[in-house]
């Protein structure tokens, strides 16, 4: 077909075509009048002359079948399908006269952004429940009808899990500016890839620009894989936790379904208010016009094409580099402990580290957003096996009181001014308790050379799993204490020989594993994290809340009475093995589980010299651990018991917590009144 023929409007029986609305990678869109009903429609006609091949026809037919399955008020519907007089495929849709999202500047209309996102969450949730992944969520594919309601369009490259694959395994389709890391690598996808793209759209609506840019599609795709999520301007910080969760590099760290994402929007809406659809601004995106889009009125109907079709060598190089990039870059750690009295049981939202970022305490919105995913297993959710997301019908969480942020202090507090037990936190890091250098207890002074911040809880399986996904660290050998034969059982932190969930302290990690975790956490948070020394750990443990003794924690109880001598009285704590962190009363500093649950690795070396920065244990064959564990009887050891073990082996009774060093000449990392 020559150019003249391709520019000529097609002839379709029953429709009167008045002009072209837009031209995409594989199809043209025409404005027409449906004669029988006297209504305007849009007709998408396959333009075979621009994209030859049977796969194009297959994709076009697939799009029509996919849209025909979807009957939702926020998804563009389909009226008719057939062939033009010259044999080209077409399908007919309603004419949507109000353009697409790329033409709208909503940066100062947060309520409208919330309303649009809510509609798109419901549309995606509906599609995902049918096993359909859109794979090209972007502003051009969000159209507005005559009532100015947003509708999701263009399912041309959608993936239906219950049907045959339309694209070859390993091919990369979609729009690079909105593409999830796993989509950029050509990995199998599920609905969480669409939620990532919707997070990018959210960032763009709030800021007027894409989070990642580059000179070509390869550079942009690599940025999605390698670069941390950028920070929003201060006036939009209440959106940051939502963006961070939506755009997490690892699918397991994102919202796990559209319902969770919409629930998080409720928290943001409590801050910014709500809007009717009539409040959507319609002026062009000045920051984007002329930079990366043409503002054609029907741009949303342009079909996505294979990235870089004219540069096969570039595609090959891009996919090779992307697939060999670290599987989970800038994966976040999510704490599992309460943050503020206003949000009991909530946790800090993930925030990947980035240059120039500031430390802030978790806001109630951040805390509540992070808690939405707290029941998702870190072991099960991270596998991208290409299966559809299982719908999770949930009652939306009860509204939470949103506490306004405290005004910024005129002068940042100093370490010397902090009260004992003050709650500290690097943004995106674990909760820490401030431990002064000295205190007096019952008239006896206890002193170390410096103040420090200690993790309020032991490192959990969820937190350690994020580290493993980010670094690819292999599991250490693990054994049961005093049982050399247990090395033959292939125990590991994933399978310690007893049941644990994500909120339990991680065990079966070697000293080298624990030290590597602390170093990784410090690098990610731009702070000095490490394991505590024995003297630091015991100094914190001496701030006891009373004289409860060893039975104040999770130790050997009556469920393990067979191990006890007849004259021993077991503690009845209700946990046969480890307990979730924070189940028992904290000490006066707000530090939890210093008695029982797991013994903890320390920095101290035995039988060798520990070099600064050494996380491998090679120059120090053994390291000390301290404290009692779930396996110890009440009469076995004092709470500050210490012993040493091989640095390269994990044990079913030993975990760890982190220490953050404090510079007395610099402001501490976020100060909040201690909340316990």
Image: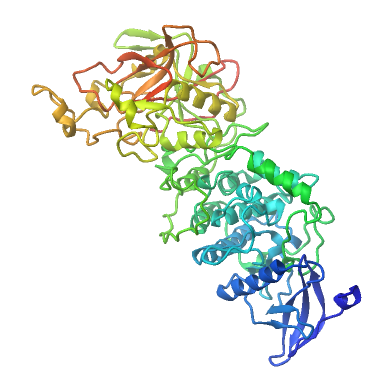
Between 56 and 190, the one nearer to me in the picture? 56
Between 485 and 577, the one nearer to me in the picture? 485
Between 51 and 81, the one nearer to me in the picture? 51
Asked whether, in this view, residue 527 is left or right of residue 184, the answer is left
Can I make out residue 36 in this image? yes
Task: State the residue at coordinates (42%, 25%).
Answer: 657
Query: For residue 355, which quarter of the picture?
Result: top right
Residue 185: image x %, image y %? 64, 47
Asked whether, in this view, residue 651 is left or right of residue 334, the answer is left
Q: How many labels does the image show?
A: 0
Q: Quadrant of the C terminus?
A: top left
Residue 292: image x %, image y %? 80, 54
Residue 388: image x %, image y %? 50, 59
Can I make out residue 593 in this image? no
Task: State the residue at coordinates (21%, 18%).
Answer: 636
Up-down: is 668 above or below 153? above
């Amino acid at each position: 077909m020559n150019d003249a023929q391709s520019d000529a409007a097609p002839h379709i029986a029953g429709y009167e075509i008045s002009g072209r609305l837009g031209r995409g990678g594989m199809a043209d869109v025409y404005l027409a009048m449906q004669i029988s009903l006297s209504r305007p429609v849009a007709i998408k006609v396959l333009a075979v002359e621009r994209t030859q091949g049977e796969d194009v026809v297959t994709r076009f037919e697939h799009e029509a079948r996919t849209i025909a399955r979807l009957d939702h008020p926020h998804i563009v519907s389909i009226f008719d399908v057939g062939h033009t007089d010259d044999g080209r495929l077409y399908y007919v849709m309603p004419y949507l006269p109000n353009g697409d999202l790329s033409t709208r500047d909503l940066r100062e209309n947060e309520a409208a952004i919330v309303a649009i996102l809510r509609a798109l969450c419901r549309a995606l949730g509906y599609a995902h429940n049918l096993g359909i992944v859109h794979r090209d969520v972007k502003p051009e594919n969000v159209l507005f009808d005559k009532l100015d309601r947003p509708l999701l369009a263009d399912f041309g490259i959608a993936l239906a899990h219950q049907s045959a694959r339309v694209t070859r395994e390993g091919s990369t389709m979609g729009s690079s500016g909105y593409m999830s890391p796993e989509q950029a690598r050509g990995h199998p996808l599920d609905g969480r890839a669409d939620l990532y793209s919707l997070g990018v759209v959210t960032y763009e609506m709030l800021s007027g620009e894409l989070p990642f840019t580059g000179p070509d599609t390869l550079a942009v795709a690599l940025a999605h894989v390698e670069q941390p999520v950028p920070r929003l301007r201060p006036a939009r910080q209440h959106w940051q936790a939502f963006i961070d969760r939506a755009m997490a590099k690892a699918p397991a760290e994102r919202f796990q379904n559209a319902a969770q994402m919409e629930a998080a929007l409720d928290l943001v809406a409590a801050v910014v208010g709500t809007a009717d659809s009539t409040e959507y601004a319609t002026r062009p995106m000045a920051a984007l016009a002329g930079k990366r889009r043409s503002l054609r009125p029907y741009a949303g109907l342009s079909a996505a094409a294979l990235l870089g079709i004219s540069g096969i060598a570039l595609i090959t190089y891009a996919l090779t580099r992307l697939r060999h990039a670290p599987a989970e870059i800038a994966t976040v750690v999510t704490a599992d402990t309460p943050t503020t009295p206003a949000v009991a049981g909530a946790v800090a939202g993930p925030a990947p580290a980035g240059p120039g970022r500031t430390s802030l305490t978790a806001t109630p919105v951040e805390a509540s957003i992070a808690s939405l995913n707290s029941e998702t297993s870190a072991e099960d959710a991270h596998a991208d096996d290409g299966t559809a997301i299982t719908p999770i019908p949930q009652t939306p969480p009860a509204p939470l009181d949103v506490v306004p942020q405290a005004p910024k202090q005129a002068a940042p507090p100093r370490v010397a001014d902090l009260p004992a037990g003050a709650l500290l936190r690097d943004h995106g890091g674990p909760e820490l308790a401030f431990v002064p250098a000295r205190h007096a207890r019952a008239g006896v002074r206890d002193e170390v050379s410096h103040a420090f911040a200690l993790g309020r809880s032991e490192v959990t399986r969820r937190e350690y799993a994020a580290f493993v996904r980010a670094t690819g660290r292999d599991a250490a050998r693990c054994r049961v204490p005093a049982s050399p034969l247990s090395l033959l059982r292939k125990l590991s932190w994933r399978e310690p020989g007893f049941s644990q969930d994500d909120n339990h302290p991680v065990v079966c990690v070697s000293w080298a594993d624990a030290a590597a975790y602390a170093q990784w956490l410090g690098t990610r948070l731009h702070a000095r994290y490490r394991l505590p020394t024995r003297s630091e750990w015991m100094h914190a443990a001496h701030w006891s809340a009373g004289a409860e003794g060893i039975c104040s924690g999770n130790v050997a109880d009556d469920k393990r009475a067979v191990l006890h001598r007849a004259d021993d009285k077991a503690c009845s704590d209700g946990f046969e093995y480890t307990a979730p962190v924070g189940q028992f009363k904290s000490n006066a500093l707000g530090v939890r589980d210093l008695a029982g649950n797991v013994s903890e690795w320390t920095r101290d070396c035995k039988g060798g010299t520990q070099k600064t920065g050494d996380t491998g244990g090679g120059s120090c064959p053994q390291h000390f651990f301290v404290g009692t564990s779930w396996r110890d009887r009440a009469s076995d050891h004092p709470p500050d018991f210490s012993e040493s073990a091989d640095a390269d082996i994990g044990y079913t009774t030993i975990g760890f917590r982190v220490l953050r060093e404090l510079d007395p000449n610099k402001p501490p990392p976020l100060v909040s009144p201690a909340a316990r």
